[in-house]
Amino acid sequence: MPISNTEQTQTTTQNEWGVFGRPLFLDKDARALSRVGVVDVGSNSVRMVVFDGAARSPAYFYNEKILCGLGAGLRETGCLNPKGKERALSAIKRFQKLAQGMGIPPLTAVATAAMREAQDGPAFREEILQETGLSLWVIDGEEEARLSAQGVLLGWPDAKGMICDIGGSSMELAVVGNGTVGKRLTSPLGPLKLQGLKGGRKGIKEHIKPVMAGLAETMGTDHKRIYLVGGSWRAIARIDMERRGYPLHVLHEYRMSVRDVSKTIAYIHDNPLEDIRSKTGTSSARMALVPIASEVLRQMVRTFKPKEICISSYGIREGMLYEQMPQAIRERDPLIEACRFAEHKDARLPGVGKRLHRFIEPIFRAREYEKMRLIRAACLLHDVTWRAHPDYRAEVCFDNATRANLGGLTHKERVFLGLALLHRYKNSREGTSFAPLIDMLSEQEIQNAEVLGKAMRFGAMIAVDAPDEMAEMRFFPKKKELILTLKPEAEDLFGEVTEARFMSLANALGAKTEVRHAKK
Protein backbone atom coordinates (compact mmCIF):
# COMPACT_ATOMS: atom_id res chain seq x y z
CA MET A 1 0.00 0.00 0.00
CA PRO A 2 1.16 3.56 -0.54
CA ILE A 3 2.11 5.54 2.53
CA SER A 4 -0.44 7.99 3.80
CA ASN A 5 0.74 11.15 2.09
CA THR A 6 1.58 9.76 -1.34
CA GLU A 7 2.26 12.99 -3.17
CA GLN A 8 4.56 14.29 -0.44
CA THR A 9 6.40 10.98 -0.30
CA GLN A 10 6.93 10.86 -4.06
CA THR A 11 8.30 14.41 -4.01
CA THR A 12 10.62 13.61 -1.10
CA THR A 13 12.08 10.49 -2.71
CA GLN A 14 12.46 12.13 -6.10
CA ASN A 15 14.43 14.93 -4.47
CA GLU A 16 16.86 12.41 -2.99
CA TRP A 17 18.02 9.67 -5.35
CA GLY A 18 15.35 9.73 -8.03
CA VAL A 19 12.28 7.60 -7.46
CA PHE A 20 14.26 5.10 -5.39
CA GLY A 21 15.45 7.50 -2.72
CA ARG A 22 18.59 7.20 -0.64
CA PRO A 23 19.09 3.72 0.89
CA LEU A 24 17.65 4.06 4.36
CA PHE A 25 19.76 1.32 5.92
CA LEU A 26 22.90 3.36 5.24
CA ASP A 27 21.67 6.25 7.42
CA LYS A 28 23.11 6.41 10.95
CA ASP A 29 19.62 6.78 12.47
CA ALA A 30 18.58 3.53 10.81
CA ARG A 31 21.77 1.68 11.74
CA ALA A 32 21.09 2.59 15.36
CA LEU A 33 17.92 0.47 15.15
CA SER A 34 19.75 -2.65 13.98
CA ARG A 35 19.42 -5.67 16.26
CA VAL A 36 16.79 -4.25 18.59
CA GLY A 37 15.47 -6.80 21.08
CA VAL A 38 12.10 -6.47 22.80
CA VAL A 39 10.25 -8.64 25.32
CA ASP A 40 6.47 -8.58 25.73
CA VAL A 41 5.20 -10.08 29.01
CA GLY A 42 1.53 -10.59 28.31
CA SER A 43 -1.33 -12.20 30.19
CA ASN A 44 -1.15 -15.34 28.07
CA SER A 45 2.32 -15.39 26.50
CA VAL A 46 5.85 -14.11 26.98
CA ARG A 47 7.70 -13.39 23.75
CA MET A 48 11.09 -12.08 22.69
CA VAL A 49 11.64 -10.60 19.24
CA VAL A 50 14.95 -9.38 17.87
CA PHE A 51 14.58 -7.13 14.83
CA ASP A 52 17.29 -6.67 12.22
CA GLY A 53 17.81 -5.44 8.70
CA ALA A 54 16.05 -2.60 6.93
CA ALA A 55 14.89 -0.40 9.79
CA ARG A 56 11.61 0.69 8.17
CA SER A 57 10.68 -2.90 7.32
CA PRO A 58 12.70 -5.06 9.70
CA ALA A 59 13.26 -8.77 9.49
CA TYR A 60 12.72 -11.03 12.48
CA PHE A 61 16.26 -12.03 13.39
CA TYR A 62 14.91 -14.06 16.31
CA ASN A 63 11.37 -14.72 17.50
CA GLU A 64 10.34 -17.01 20.39
CA LYS A 65 7.12 -17.28 22.36
CA ILE A 66 6.17 -19.21 25.50
CA LEU A 67 2.49 -19.58 26.45
CA CYS A 68 2.76 -19.03 30.20
CA GLY A 69 -0.82 -18.12 31.17
CA LEU A 70 0.18 -15.49 33.74
CA GLY A 71 -3.36 -14.16 33.78
CA ALA A 72 -5.12 -17.50 34.18
CA GLY A 73 -7.44 -17.31 37.21
CA LEU A 74 -6.72 -13.62 37.79
CA ARG A 75 -10.43 -12.77 38.00
CA GLU A 76 -11.00 -15.20 40.87
CA THR A 77 -7.76 -14.82 42.84
CA GLY A 78 -6.58 -11.30 42.06
CA CYS A 79 -3.07 -12.77 41.67
CA LEU A 80 -0.85 -14.05 38.90
CA ASN A 81 -1.05 -17.75 38.15
CA PRO A 82 1.74 -19.47 40.21
CA LYS A 83 2.67 -21.92 37.45
CA GLY A 84 2.54 -19.08 34.97
CA LYS A 85 5.01 -17.08 37.07
CA GLU A 86 7.45 -19.98 37.09
CA ARG A 87 7.23 -20.37 33.33
CA ALA A 88 7.47 -16.62 32.70
CA LEU A 89 10.56 -16.23 34.90
CA SER A 90 12.20 -19.21 33.22
CA ALA A 91 11.43 -17.76 29.78
CA ILE A 92 12.83 -14.34 30.67
CA LYS A 93 16.03 -15.89 32.02
CA ARG A 94 16.42 -17.76 28.75
CA PHE A 95 15.75 -14.62 26.71
CA GLN A 96 18.39 -12.67 28.63
CA LYS A 97 20.97 -15.39 27.94
CA LEU A 98 20.04 -15.50 24.26
CA ALA A 99 20.32 -11.72 23.96
CA GLN A 100 23.77 -11.80 25.53
CA GLY A 101 24.83 -14.49 23.08
CA MET A 102 23.63 -12.38 20.16
CA GLY A 103 25.60 -9.40 21.43
CA ILE A 104 22.59 -7.10 21.20
CA PRO A 105 21.98 -4.02 23.38
CA PRO A 106 19.91 -4.46 26.57
CA LEU A 107 16.43 -5.80 25.95
CA THR A 108 13.46 -3.45 26.15
CA ALA A 109 10.64 -5.16 28.05
CA VAL A 110 6.98 -4.29 28.57
CA ALA A 111 4.31 -5.98 30.67
CA THR A 112 0.59 -5.58 30.08
CA ALA A 113 -2.79 -6.33 31.68
CA ALA A 114 -2.02 -9.25 34.02
CA MET A 115 1.05 -7.60 35.52
CA ARG A 116 -0.66 -4.23 36.00
CA GLU A 117 -3.82 -5.70 37.55
CA ALA A 118 -2.49 -8.47 39.79
CA GLN A 119 -1.93 -7.79 43.49
CA ASP A 120 1.41 -9.54 43.31
CA GLY A 121 2.42 -7.85 40.04
CA PRO A 122 4.88 -5.38 41.65
CA ALA A 123 6.50 -8.14 43.69
CA PHE A 124 6.91 -10.36 40.62
CA ARG A 125 8.36 -7.45 38.68
CA GLU A 126 10.96 -6.98 41.42
CA GLU A 127 11.70 -10.70 41.42
CA ILE A 128 12.35 -10.60 37.69
CA LEU A 129 14.68 -7.63 38.12
CA GLN A 130 16.63 -9.39 40.88
CA GLU A 131 16.84 -12.73 39.07
CA THR A 132 17.54 -11.51 35.53
CA GLY A 133 18.52 -7.84 35.68
CA LEU A 134 15.66 -7.04 33.28
CA SER A 135 13.49 -4.09 34.25
CA LEU A 136 9.87 -4.43 33.10
CA TRP A 137 7.98 -1.38 31.89
CA VAL A 138 4.42 -2.01 33.08
CA ILE A 139 2.15 -0.01 30.80
CA ASP A 140 -1.48 0.99 31.22
CA GLY A 141 -4.22 0.01 28.81
CA GLU A 142 -4.19 3.20 26.75
CA GLU A 143 -0.43 3.00 26.30
CA GLU A 144 -0.78 -0.62 25.25
CA ALA A 145 -3.38 0.46 22.69
CA ARG A 146 -1.08 3.20 21.39
CA LEU A 147 1.91 0.87 20.98
CA SER A 148 -0.21 -1.78 19.24
CA ALA A 149 -1.57 0.83 16.86
CA GLN A 150 1.96 2.01 16.11
CA GLY A 151 2.88 -1.58 15.31
CA VAL A 152 0.11 -1.67 12.73
CA LEU A 153 1.39 1.60 11.24
CA LEU A 154 4.88 0.12 10.94
CA GLY A 155 3.68 -2.49 8.45
CA TRP A 156 0.55 -0.74 7.18
CA PRO A 157 1.43 2.97 6.80
CA ASP A 158 -1.90 4.11 5.37
CA ALA A 159 -4.03 2.17 7.86
CA LYS A 160 -7.30 3.95 8.54
CA GLY A 161 -9.91 2.63 10.92
CA MET A 162 -9.87 1.00 14.34
CA ILE A 163 -7.17 -1.24 15.81
CA CYS A 164 -8.33 -4.05 18.12
CA ASP A 165 -5.59 -5.84 20.08
CA ILE A 166 -6.79 -8.80 22.11
CA GLY A 167 -4.55 -10.26 24.81
CA GLY A 168 -5.24 -12.76 27.52
CA SER A 169 -6.75 -10.40 30.11
CA SER A 170 -7.70 -7.31 28.12
CA MET A 171 -8.68 -5.94 24.74
CA GLU A 172 -7.42 -2.56 23.52
CA LEU A 173 -8.93 -0.29 20.87
CA ALA A 174 -7.33 2.64 19.04
CA VAL A 175 -8.25 4.81 16.08
CA VAL A 176 -5.63 5.28 13.34
CA GLY A 177 -5.51 7.47 10.25
CA ASN A 178 -3.09 9.71 8.38
CA GLY A 179 -0.17 7.94 10.02
CA THR A 180 -1.21 8.88 13.56
CA VAL A 181 -2.89 7.24 16.56
CA GLY A 182 -6.01 8.93 17.88
CA LYS A 183 -8.57 7.97 20.51
CA ARG A 184 -7.76 4.80 22.46
CA LEU A 185 -9.37 2.67 25.11
CA THR A 186 -8.89 -0.54 27.09
CA SER A 187 -11.44 -3.14 28.20
CA PRO A 188 -11.55 -6.38 30.25
CA LEU A 189 -12.55 -8.53 27.25
CA GLY A 190 -9.53 -10.83 27.15
CA PRO A 191 -10.46 -14.51 26.79
CA LEU A 192 -8.47 -15.61 29.86
CA LYS A 193 -10.46 -13.18 32.00
CA LEU A 194 -13.77 -14.25 30.41
CA GLN A 195 -12.94 -17.92 30.84
CA GLY A 196 -14.05 -18.03 34.46
CA LEU A 197 -17.49 -16.46 33.97
CA LYS A 198 -20.56 -18.35 35.11
CA GLY A 199 -23.25 -19.47 32.69
CA GLY A 200 -21.00 -20.93 30.01
CA ARG A 201 -21.23 -19.60 26.48
CA LYS A 202 -24.52 -17.84 27.17
CA GLY A 203 -23.10 -16.11 30.23
CA ILE A 204 -20.06 -14.97 28.27
CA LYS A 205 -22.23 -13.55 25.48
CA GLU A 206 -24.44 -11.69 27.96
CA HIS A 207 -21.34 -10.23 29.64
CA ILE A 208 -19.68 -9.11 26.39
CA LYS A 209 -22.64 -7.28 24.85
CA PRO A 210 -22.99 -4.32 27.28
CA VAL A 211 -19.22 -3.89 27.56
CA MET A 212 -18.93 -3.71 23.78
CA ALA A 213 -21.79 -1.21 23.62
CA GLY A 214 -19.96 1.00 26.10
CA LEU A 215 -16.79 0.83 23.97
CA ALA A 216 -18.77 1.87 20.90
CA GLU A 217 -20.13 4.93 22.69
CA THR A 218 -16.59 6.17 23.24
CA MET A 219 -14.92 4.98 20.03
CA GLY A 220 -17.78 5.55 17.59
CA THR A 221 -19.06 3.11 14.98
CA ASP A 222 -17.96 4.86 11.77
CA HIS A 223 -14.88 2.69 11.19
CA LYS A 224 -15.07 0.97 7.81
CA ARG A 225 -12.10 -1.22 8.61
CA ILE A 226 -11.02 -2.99 11.79
CA TYR A 227 -7.42 -4.21 12.13
CA LEU A 228 -7.08 -7.22 14.41
CA VAL A 229 -3.91 -7.71 16.47
CA GLY A 230 -3.20 -10.62 18.80
CA GLY A 231 -2.71 -14.37 18.88
CA SER A 232 -6.38 -15.28 19.31
CA TRP A 233 -7.37 -13.20 16.29
CA ARG A 234 -4.59 -14.77 14.21
CA ALA A 235 -5.79 -18.23 15.23
CA ILE A 236 -9.31 -17.35 14.04
CA ALA A 237 -7.87 -16.05 10.77
CA ARG A 238 -6.04 -19.35 10.22
CA ILE A 239 -9.32 -21.17 10.78
CA ASP A 240 -11.02 -18.86 8.27
CA MET A 241 -8.30 -19.70 5.72
CA GLU A 242 -8.84 -23.42 6.35
CA ARG A 243 -12.61 -23.12 6.04
CA ARG A 244 -12.38 -21.14 2.79
CA GLY A 245 -9.54 -23.15 1.26
CA TYR A 246 -7.61 -19.90 0.89
CA PRO A 247 -4.39 -20.58 -1.05
CA LEU A 248 -1.97 -18.02 0.45
CA HIS A 249 -1.19 -18.83 4.09
CA VAL A 250 0.19 -15.41 5.02
CA LEU A 251 -1.63 -13.84 7.96
CA HIS A 252 -0.42 -10.27 7.59
CA GLU A 253 -2.95 -8.21 5.57
CA TYR A 254 -5.32 -11.17 5.34
CA ARG A 255 -8.84 -9.80 4.94
CA MET A 256 -12.23 -11.12 5.94
CA SER A 257 -15.72 -9.85 5.23
CA VAL A 258 -18.36 -9.69 7.94
CA ARG A 259 -19.98 -12.71 6.32
CA ASP A 260 -16.69 -14.64 6.41
CA VAL A 261 -16.35 -13.92 10.12
CA SER A 262 -19.88 -15.10 10.81
CA LYS A 263 -19.35 -18.35 8.91
CA THR A 264 -16.04 -19.03 10.62
CA ILE A 265 -17.46 -18.47 14.10
CA ALA A 266 -20.20 -20.97 13.27
CA TYR A 267 -17.53 -23.36 11.95
CA ILE A 268 -15.62 -23.09 15.24
CA HIS A 269 -18.69 -23.93 17.32
CA ASP A 270 -19.95 -26.69 14.99
CA ASN A 271 -16.72 -28.71 14.73
CA PRO A 272 -14.52 -30.51 17.26
CA LEU A 273 -11.78 -28.14 18.43
CA GLU A 274 -9.17 -30.90 18.25
CA ASP A 275 -9.94 -31.43 14.55
CA ILE A 276 -9.64 -27.70 13.87
CA ARG A 277 -6.45 -27.51 15.92
CA SER A 278 -4.74 -30.29 13.98
CA LYS A 279 -5.74 -28.82 10.61
CA THR A 280 -4.48 -25.33 11.43
CA GLY A 281 -1.44 -26.13 13.56
CA THR A 282 -2.81 -24.13 16.50
CA SER A 283 -1.47 -24.95 19.96
CA SER A 284 -3.80 -26.56 22.49
CA ALA A 285 -3.43 -23.61 24.88
CA ARG A 286 -4.40 -21.14 22.15
CA MET A 287 -7.24 -23.27 20.83
CA ALA A 288 -8.81 -23.39 24.29
CA LEU A 289 -9.28 -19.60 24.10
CA VAL A 290 -10.52 -19.43 20.49
CA PRO A 291 -14.25 -20.10 21.18
CA ILE A 292 -14.31 -17.29 23.77
CA ALA A 293 -12.37 -14.92 21.48
CA SER A 294 -14.78 -15.74 18.66
CA GLU A 295 -17.72 -14.58 20.81
CA VAL A 296 -15.89 -11.28 21.41
CA LEU A 297 -15.32 -10.95 17.66
CA ARG A 298 -18.94 -11.76 16.88
CA GLN A 299 -20.20 -9.01 19.17
CA MET A 300 -17.59 -6.53 17.98
CA VAL A 301 -18.63 -7.01 14.35
CA ARG A 302 -22.31 -6.66 15.27
CA THR A 303 -21.64 -3.52 17.31
CA PHE A 304 -19.14 -1.64 15.14
CA LYS A 305 -20.45 -2.88 11.75
CA PRO A 306 -17.18 -2.63 9.76
CA LYS A 307 -17.05 -3.27 6.02
CA GLU A 308 -13.81 -5.24 6.28
CA ILE A 309 -11.79 -7.04 8.96
CA CYS A 310 -8.01 -7.18 8.45
CA ILE A 311 -5.31 -9.16 10.24
CA SER A 312 -2.09 -7.46 11.29
CA SER A 313 0.86 -9.62 12.31
CA TYR A 314 2.43 -6.47 13.72
CA GLY A 315 1.48 -5.23 17.16
CA ILE A 316 2.94 -4.04 20.43
CA ARG A 317 6.47 -5.34 19.81
CA GLU A 318 6.66 -3.68 16.42
CA GLY A 319 5.12 -0.60 18.01
CA MET A 320 8.04 -0.46 20.43
CA LEU A 321 10.43 -0.43 17.47
CA TYR A 322 8.31 2.21 15.70
CA GLU A 323 8.53 4.30 18.87
CA GLN A 324 12.30 4.60 18.37
CA MET A 325 12.09 5.67 14.71
CA PRO A 326 12.66 9.29 13.72
CA GLN A 327 9.75 10.70 11.70
CA ALA A 328 11.84 10.72 8.52
CA ILE A 329 12.20 6.95 8.79
CA ARG A 330 8.52 6.43 9.60
CA GLU A 331 7.55 8.21 6.39
CA ARG A 332 9.42 5.75 4.19
CA ASP A 333 7.64 3.03 2.21
CA PRO A 334 8.25 -0.29 4.04
CA LEU A 335 7.96 -2.32 0.84
CA ILE A 336 10.62 -0.38 -1.04
CA GLU A 337 12.91 -0.31 1.99
CA ALA A 338 12.68 -4.08 2.47
CA CYS A 339 13.30 -4.75 -1.22
CA ARG A 340 16.22 -2.34 -1.31
CA PHE A 341 17.77 -4.07 1.68
CA ALA A 342 17.26 -7.50 0.08
CA GLU A 343 19.06 -6.31 -3.06
CA HIS A 344 21.91 -4.86 -1.02
CA LYS A 345 22.29 -8.14 0.89
CA ASP A 346 21.63 -10.80 -1.76
CA ALA A 347 21.92 -9.50 -5.35
CA ARG A 348 24.97 -10.24 -7.49
CA LEU A 349 25.37 -6.56 -8.35
CA PRO A 350 23.60 -4.34 -5.80
CA GLY A 351 22.35 -1.14 -7.40
CA VAL A 352 21.40 -2.67 -10.74
CA GLY A 353 17.72 -2.75 -9.74
CA LYS A 354 17.55 1.02 -9.99
CA ARG A 355 19.18 0.97 -13.43
CA LEU A 356 16.92 -1.82 -14.63
CA HIS A 357 13.91 0.20 -13.48
CA ARG A 358 15.20 3.21 -15.41
CA PHE A 359 15.47 1.06 -18.53
CA ILE A 360 11.99 -0.52 -18.40
CA GLU A 361 10.09 2.44 -16.92
CA PRO A 362 9.03 3.92 -20.33
CA ILE A 363 6.76 0.91 -20.86
CA PHE A 364 4.83 1.70 -17.67
CA ARG A 365 4.85 5.51 -17.44
CA ALA A 366 1.09 5.84 -17.65
CA ARG A 367 0.54 3.67 -14.53
CA GLU A 368 -0.65 5.08 -11.23
CA TYR A 369 1.70 5.38 -8.26
CA GLU A 370 0.51 2.19 -6.59
CA LYS A 371 1.46 0.13 -9.64
CA MET A 372 4.77 1.97 -10.08
CA ARG A 373 5.92 1.09 -6.56
CA LEU A 374 5.33 -2.61 -7.36
CA ILE A 375 7.43 -2.21 -10.51
CA ARG A 376 10.22 -0.63 -8.47
CA ALA A 377 9.98 -3.41 -5.89
CA ALA A 378 10.20 -6.08 -8.62
CA CYS A 379 13.31 -4.47 -10.12
CA LEU A 380 14.99 -4.42 -6.73
CA LEU A 381 14.18 -8.11 -6.19
CA HIS A 382 14.88 -9.29 -9.74
CA ASP A 383 18.24 -10.86 -8.91
CA VAL A 384 18.13 -11.72 -5.19
CA THR A 385 17.52 -15.45 -5.75
CA TRP A 386 20.36 -15.96 -8.22
CA ARG A 387 21.98 -18.59 -5.97
CA ALA A 388 19.02 -20.94 -6.44
CA HIS A 389 19.37 -23.81 -8.90
CA PRO A 390 18.47 -22.54 -12.42
CA ASP A 391 15.73 -25.17 -12.77
CA TYR A 392 13.95 -23.80 -9.69
CA ARG A 393 14.91 -20.13 -9.72
CA ALA A 394 11.55 -18.96 -11.07
CA GLU A 395 9.67 -20.89 -8.39
CA VAL A 396 11.98 -19.61 -5.65
CA CYS A 397 11.35 -16.05 -6.88
CA PHE A 398 7.60 -16.57 -6.65
CA ASP A 399 7.83 -18.06 -3.17
CA ASN A 400 10.17 -15.31 -2.02
CA ALA A 401 7.72 -12.57 -2.98
CA THR A 402 4.52 -14.23 -1.83
CA ARG A 403 5.75 -15.53 1.53
CA ALA A 404 8.48 -13.09 2.58
CA ASN A 405 8.16 -10.74 5.53
CA LEU A 406 7.13 -7.66 3.54
CA GLY A 407 4.99 -4.82 4.87
CA GLY A 408 2.76 -2.49 2.89
CA LEU A 409 1.66 -5.22 0.50
CA THR A 410 -1.78 -6.75 0.00
CA HIS A 411 -2.14 -10.44 -0.78
CA LYS A 412 -3.02 -9.75 -4.42
CA GLU A 413 0.01 -7.48 -4.69
CA ARG A 414 2.20 -10.26 -3.28
CA VAL A 415 0.97 -12.61 -5.98
CA PHE A 416 1.41 -9.95 -8.69
CA LEU A 417 5.00 -9.36 -7.54
CA GLY A 418 5.68 -13.10 -7.38
CA LEU A 419 4.30 -13.69 -10.87
CA ALA A 420 6.35 -10.84 -12.34
CA LEU A 421 9.50 -12.29 -10.78
CA LEU A 422 8.60 -15.76 -12.03
CA HIS A 423 8.47 -14.35 -15.56
CA ARG A 424 11.80 -12.64 -14.96
CA TYR A 425 13.31 -16.14 -15.17
CA LYS A 426 10.76 -18.08 -17.16
CA ASN A 427 8.71 -17.25 -20.25
CA SER A 428 5.82 -19.54 -19.40
CA ARG A 429 4.03 -20.14 -16.12
CA GLU A 430 2.61 -23.44 -17.35
CA GLY A 431 3.54 -26.44 -15.27
CA THR A 432 4.03 -24.55 -12.02
CA SER A 433 2.08 -25.37 -8.86
CA PHE A 434 1.00 -21.77 -8.35
CA ALA A 435 -2.27 -21.79 -10.31
CA PRO A 436 -4.51 -21.39 -7.20
CA LEU A 437 -2.54 -18.29 -6.19
CA ILE A 438 -2.38 -16.84 -9.70
CA ASP A 439 -6.16 -17.25 -9.92
CA MET A 440 -6.42 -14.53 -7.25
CA LEU A 441 -5.50 -12.02 -9.99
CA SER A 442 -7.65 -10.75 -12.84
CA GLU A 443 -6.69 -11.54 -16.43
CA GLN A 444 -5.43 -7.97 -16.86
CA GLU A 445 -3.31 -8.20 -13.72
CA ILE A 446 -1.83 -11.50 -14.91
CA GLN A 447 -0.96 -9.93 -18.25
CA ASN A 448 0.59 -6.88 -16.56
CA ALA A 449 2.73 -9.12 -14.35
CA GLU A 450 3.89 -11.08 -17.38
CA VAL A 451 4.83 -7.87 -19.22
CA LEU A 452 6.77 -6.65 -16.19
CA GLY A 453 8.59 -9.97 -15.81
CA LYS A 454 9.53 -10.16 -19.47
CA ALA A 455 10.68 -6.54 -19.47
CA MET A 456 13.03 -7.33 -16.57
CA ARG A 457 14.13 -10.54 -18.31
CA PHE A 458 15.08 -8.60 -21.43
CA GLY A 459 16.67 -5.74 -19.52
CA ALA A 460 18.86 -8.10 -17.50
CA MET A 461 20.00 -9.69 -20.77
CA ILE A 462 20.89 -6.52 -22.63
CA ALA A 463 23.46 -5.73 -19.93
CA VAL A 464 24.07 -7.27 -16.52
CA ASP A 465 25.21 -4.00 -14.93
CA ALA A 466 23.76 -0.95 -16.72
CA PRO A 467 21.00 -1.68 -19.25
CA ASP A 468 19.96 1.97 -19.16
CA GLU A 469 23.35 2.93 -20.63
CA MET A 470 23.24 0.35 -23.42
CA ALA A 471 19.81 0.96 -24.93
CA GLU A 472 16.55 2.84 -24.70
CA MET A 473 12.99 1.55 -25.02
CA ARG A 474 9.87 3.46 -25.96
CA PHE A 475 6.36 2.05 -26.08
CA PHE A 476 3.38 3.63 -27.81
CA PRO A 477 0.25 1.93 -26.41
CA LYS A 478 -2.19 3.33 -28.97
CA LYS A 479 -0.02 2.31 -31.93
CA LYS A 480 1.01 -0.90 -30.15
CA GLU A 481 4.59 -0.19 -31.13
CA LEU A 482 7.73 -1.03 -29.16
CA ILE A 483 10.91 0.74 -30.26
CA LEU A 484 14.38 -0.26 -29.10
CA THR A 485 17.29 2.07 -29.75
CA LEU A 486 20.69 0.42 -29.35
CA LYS A 487 23.74 2.52 -28.55
CA PRO A 488 26.90 1.70 -30.54
CA GLU A 489 28.55 -0.06 -27.62
CA ALA A 490 25.52 -2.36 -27.29
CA GLU A 491 25.53 -3.73 -30.85
CA ASP A 492 27.40 -6.90 -29.88
CA LEU A 493 25.14 -7.40 -26.85
CA PHE A 494 22.02 -7.76 -28.98
CA GLY A 495 22.57 -11.41 -29.85
CA GLU A 496 20.12 -14.20 -30.65
CA VAL A 497 18.97 -14.85 -27.08
CA THR A 498 18.67 -11.12 -26.35
CA GLU A 499 16.59 -10.62 -29.47
CA ALA A 500 14.37 -13.56 -28.55
CA ARG A 501 13.67 -12.00 -25.15
CA PHE A 502 12.90 -8.67 -26.78
CA MET A 503 10.37 -10.38 -29.07
CA SER A 504 8.85 -12.23 -26.09
CA LEU A 505 8.28 -8.87 -24.38
CA ALA A 506 6.72 -7.47 -27.56
CA ASN A 507 4.40 -10.48 -27.83
CA ALA A 508 3.28 -9.98 -24.22
CA LEU A 509 2.49 -6.35 -25.07
CA GLY A 510 0.81 -7.34 -28.34
CA ALA A 511 3.12 -4.87 -30.07
CA LYS A 512 5.05 -4.68 -33.32
CA THR A 513 8.73 -3.91 -32.98
CA GLU A 514 11.39 -1.68 -34.44
CA VAL A 515 15.10 -1.82 -33.61
CA ARG A 516 17.05 1.35 -34.23
CA HIS A 517 20.77 1.95 -34.08
CA ALA A 518 22.05 5.16 -32.57
CA LYS A 519 24.84 6.92 -34.41
CA LYS A 520 28.30 7.14 -32.91
Image (cartoon, grey):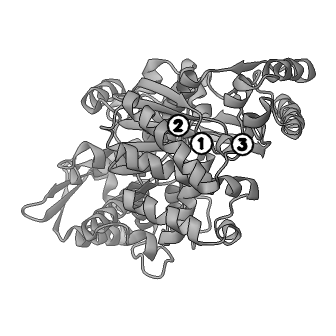
Residue at 17% from the left image edge and 57% from the top image edge: 475
Please, which residue is most extreme toward the bottom here?
431
Nearest-to-viewer mark from 2 and 1: 2
Residue at the spot of label 2: 57
In the displayed structure, 307 sits above or below 182; it is below
Q: Amino acid at mark 3?
A: Asn
> Which quadrant of the view contains residue 284?
bottom right
Mark 3 or mark 1: whose residue is earlier in sequence: 3
Please, which residue is most extreme toward the left here?
479
Q: CA distance from mark 2 to mark 3?
A: 16 Å
Residue at 59% from the left image edge and 49% from the top image edge: 204
Q: Given contact means CB atoms under 8 Å apart, are the residues at marks 2 and 3 in contact?
A: no
Q: Given contact means CB atoms under 8 Å apart, are the residues at marks 3 and 1 in contact?
A: no
SS for tag 3? strand
In the displayed structure, 349 sits above or below 50; it is below
Res. 52 in view: yes
Mark 2 or mark 1: whose residue is earlier in sequence: 2
In the displayed structure, 497 sits above or below 184; it is below
In the displayed structure, 263 sits above or below 356; it is below
Nearest-to-viewer mark from 2 and 3: 3
Rate crowding at label 2 as few (under 14), some (14 to 19) or many (20 or more) other CA atoms within 10 Å.
many
Residue at 49% from the left image edge and 77% from the top image edge: 432
Residue at the spot of label 1: 345
Would residue 249 appear left or right of 288 to someone viewing this image? left
